[in-house]
Amino acid sequence: MITESDISCGVAQLSRLHHTPKTLIQEAFNHNEAGKEWAEEFVHLLWSDNLGRGVALRGGEKLAKVVRAENLGALFVTRSRRNPNSGNQIKTWMWAVNWQAVRNYLQ
């Protein structure tokens, strides 16, 4: 799910990372395209995920892997930190989306 961020109107947040990376990328693309009608496009997409124990790759890592492999824009990631509320190890990603590369990837 894509939601607008309070940080800036050019930043969106991504949640429900259990979907496939391609589904998440398609959702982001559709949301951005629809946003053109009311000037709600975004250039940065943020997401966070816990790293889990015994799980090879969580949704956040899977999405990051596809963004990098397909050269869909610059990707920045924090180092793993302990969430003081849950105790889980988490990372946060910021994707500077290259919409033309995304369009090509989805075709």
Image (cartoon, rainbow, N blue to C red):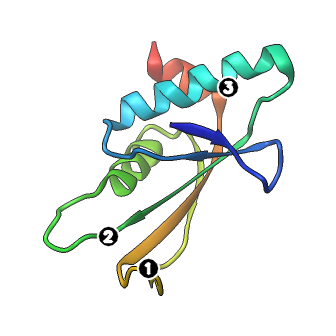
Q: Earlier in the sequence, mark 3 or mark 1?
A: 3
Q: Earlier in the sequence, mark 1 or mark 2?
A: 2
Q: In this picture, is 55 found above or below 75?
A: below
Could you say which disc has been placed on residue 80 in the image?
A: 1
Q: In this picture, is 103 found above or below 74?
A: above
Q: Secondary structure at mark 3?
A: helix
Kindly give the residue lying farthest to the left in the view shown: 54
| Residue located beneath label 3 in the image | 32
**Given contact means CB atoms under 8 Å apart, are the residues at marks 1 and 2 in contact?**
yes
The picture places residue 6, in percent across and down from the top left corner, at 78, 53
Query: Residue placed at 39% from the left, 79% from the top?
Result: 86
Query: Residue placed at 55% from the left, 27% from the top?
Result: 102
Badge 1 crowding class, 10 Å Cα cut-off, few under 14, some 14 to 19, many 20 or more, is: some
Q: Is residue 58 left or right of 54 when viewed as pictured?
A: right
Q: CA distance from mark 3 to mark 2?
A: 28 Å
> Callout 1, which amino acid?
Ser
| Residue located beneath label 2 in the image | 51
Please count the marks in the image: 3
Badge 3 crowding class, 10 Å Cα cut-off, few under 14, some 14 to 19, many 20 or more, is: some
Q: Secondary structure at mark 2?
A: loop
**Given contact means CB atoms under 8 Å apart, are the residues at marks 3 and 1 in contact?**
no
The picture places residue 10, in percent across and down from the top left corner, at 80, 42
